[in-house]
Image (cartoon, rainbow, N blue to C red):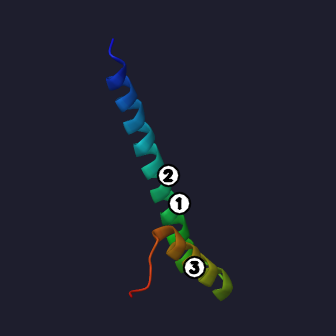
Amino acid sequence: MPVLPALLQDAATLAAAGGTLYTAVLAAVALTSVLAATPDRRRDARATLTILMRRRPPR
């Protein structure tokens, strides 16, 4: 049995799992930034979301 197809399948599964986990974390932080009880927590969640989204200010 060729090894390359098995490795590609494993890599694709791992990439899909990582993408799903990253999306779930982004959704949780986005919900926290909207639904947090205190303004400080909302501000911290928005800062974290900015870091996770890798947004940069325009040049």
Identify the element where label 3 is drawn. Answer: helix
The quadrant in which residue 3 appears is: top left
Q: Quadrant of the N terminus?
A: top left
* Badge 1: residue crowd in 10 Å (few <14, some 14–19, many ≥20): some
The residue under the point 47% across, 48% down is 18
User: The residue under label 3 is which amino acid type?
Assistant: Ala
Identify the element where label 2 is drawn. Answer: helix
The residue under the point 39% across, 86% down is 58
Identify the element where label 1 is drawn. Answer: helix
The residue under the point 55% across, 69% down is 29
User: Whole-Å distance between the Cαs marked 2 and 3?
Assistant: 19 Å
Q: Do callouts 2 and 3 mark residues in contact (Cβ within 8 Å)?
A: no
Q: Do callouts 1 and 2 mark residues in contact (Cβ within 8 Å)?
A: yes
Task: Say above or below: 41 vs 4.
Answer: below
User: Whole-Å distance between the Cαs marked 3 and 1?
Assistant: 14 Å
User: The residue under label 1 is which amino acid type?
Assistant: Val
Residue bearing mark 2: 21
Labels 2 and 3: the sequence-earlier one = 2
- Relative placement, left or right, of 50 versus 15 is right
Of tags 3 and 1, the one toward the viewer is: 3
In the rendering, which numbered label is found on residue 47? 3
- In this orientation, does residue 16 appear? yes
Q: Position of residue 49 (x, y in %)?
A: 52, 73
Q: Position of residue 5 (x, y in %)?
A: 32, 24
User: Whole-Å distance between the Cαs marked 1 and 2?
Assistant: 6 Å
- In this orientation, does residue 35 appear? no
Q: Position of residue 40 (x, y in %)?
A: 67, 85
Residue bearing mark 1: 25
Q: Position of residue 7 (x, y in %)?
A: 39, 27
The quadrant in which residue 23 appears is: bottom left
User: The residue under label 2 is which amino acid type?
Assistant: Leu
